[in-house]
């Protein structure tokens, strides 16, 4: 199982409570891998208030990571959703990473088969919109 992210480097200087909350999110299964490839990992992470956030991670030490949560948007510092995503990506089997790498492509193909003219646009939007992805995947 590959270790995609260096958790100690990612969490260096973070408040322990924030790291623990990220660990809790991961432990509760609130992280859903949406895409994986050379550009990194994209995940949807459910927050405590039922809002899903989009996390994008590019480098093993967390540089190039981003999250749509208000905490990250305000501070640009590593948030609990980024920690949870890194833990999830490190914990999954190679087959799960391959599945994540194909997820949006499969969705686009399904939309094409349904005869949707806007399949490419819908698939691209679903990648960054957790509610739309759930709706389209049924």
Image: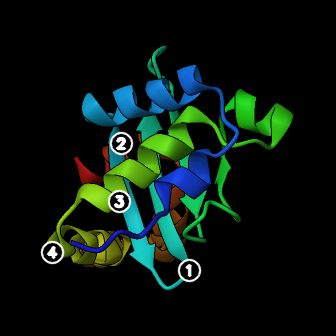
- 1 or 4: tag closer to the N-terminus: 1
- 3 or 1: tag closer to the N-terminus: 1
- 3 or 4: tag closer to the N-terminus: 3
**Quadrant in the picture for residue 116:** bottom left
- Quadrant placement of the N terminus: bottom left
**Mark 4 closeness class: few <14, some 14–19, many ≥20 residues within 10 Å:** few
Residue sitting at 33 percent across and 48 percent down? 32
**Quadrant in the picture for residue 76:** top right
**Disc 2: which residue:** 31
Pointers 3 and 1 in contact (C-beta within 8 Å): no
> CA separation, marks 1 and 4?
18 Å
Residue 63 image position (x, y, % from top left): 70, 63
> CA separation, marks 2 and 4?
17 Å
Asked if residue 133 lies left or right of residue 127, the reply is: left
Query: Callout 3: helix, strand or loop?
Result: helix
**Disc 3: which residue:** 89
Query: Callout 4: helix, strand or loop?
Result: helix
**Disc 4: which residue:** 95
- 3 or 2: tag closer to the N-terminus: 2
Q: Can you see residue 5? A: yes
> CA separation, marks 3 and 4?
12 Å
Count of numbered circles in the view: 4
């Amino acid at each position: 199982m590959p270790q995609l992210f260096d958790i100690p480097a990612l969490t260096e200087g973070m408040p322990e409570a924030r790291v623990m909350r990220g660990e809790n999110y991961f432990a509760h299964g609130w992280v859903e891998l949406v895409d994986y490839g050379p550009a990194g990992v994209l995940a949807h992470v459910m927050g405590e208030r039922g809002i899903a956030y989009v996390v994008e991670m590019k480098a093993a030490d967390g540089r190039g990571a981003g999250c749509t949560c208000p905490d990250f948007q305000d501070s640009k510092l590593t948030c609990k959703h980024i920690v949870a995503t890194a833990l999830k990506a490190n914990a999954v089997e190679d087959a799960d990473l391959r599945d994540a790498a194909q997820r949006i492509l499969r969705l686009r193909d399904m939309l094409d088969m349904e005869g949707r003219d806007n399949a490419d646009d819908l698939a691209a939007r679903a990648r960054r919109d957790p509610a739309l992805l759930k709706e389209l995947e049924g």
